[in-house]
Amino acid sequence: MDRASLIFCVAALLVTAAVSAVGFSLAAVPRELVAAARTPTPAERMGAIDLGRGFGTVPVLDLVGYYLENPPAEPAAGGVPAKARRFSGC
């Protein structure tokens, strides 16, 4: 390799590292927000959630109560099992 190619490769690596460092600092989630996301919040403090499509806002406590009173139905014996849903990216 000649000297110009070596200088170009080193410069390209330095520029890439600098752009990555600046981009990461701009895109990173603040530490306070990460700590808050890892701390469980009681349902009483969550307030209401907008369900949209005409359902409006519903308090989280009502949603939890409804789920506890009406759990998902178990598949009947000999019945068709629920279709497996896969949530993945592109």
Image (cartoon, rainbow, N blue to C red):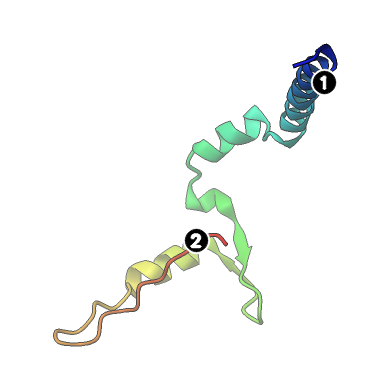
User: What amino acid does circle 2 point to?
Assistant: Ser
Q: Position of residue 30 (x, y in %)?
A: 68, 31
Q: Quadrant of residue 36?
A: top right
- The numbered mark at residue 88 is 2
Q: Secondary structure at mark 2?
A: loop
Residue 32 sits in quarter:
top right
Sequence-wise, which precedes: disc 2 or disc 1?
A: 1
* Quadrant showing the N terminus: top right
CA distance separating discs 2 and 1:
40 Å
Q: Could you say where residue 71 lies in the image, as x and y percent from the top left?
A: 32, 72
| Residue linked to disc 1 | 8
Quadrant including the C terminus: bottom right
The foreground one among 53 and 56 is 53
Kindly identify the residue that appears in the image at 31 percent across and 79 percent down.
Answer: 82
Residue 87 lies, in percent from the top left, at 47, 64
Residue in the picture at 56% in, 49% down: 45
**How many C-alpha atoms fall within 10 Å of the one at disc 1: few (<14), some, or many (≥20)?**
few
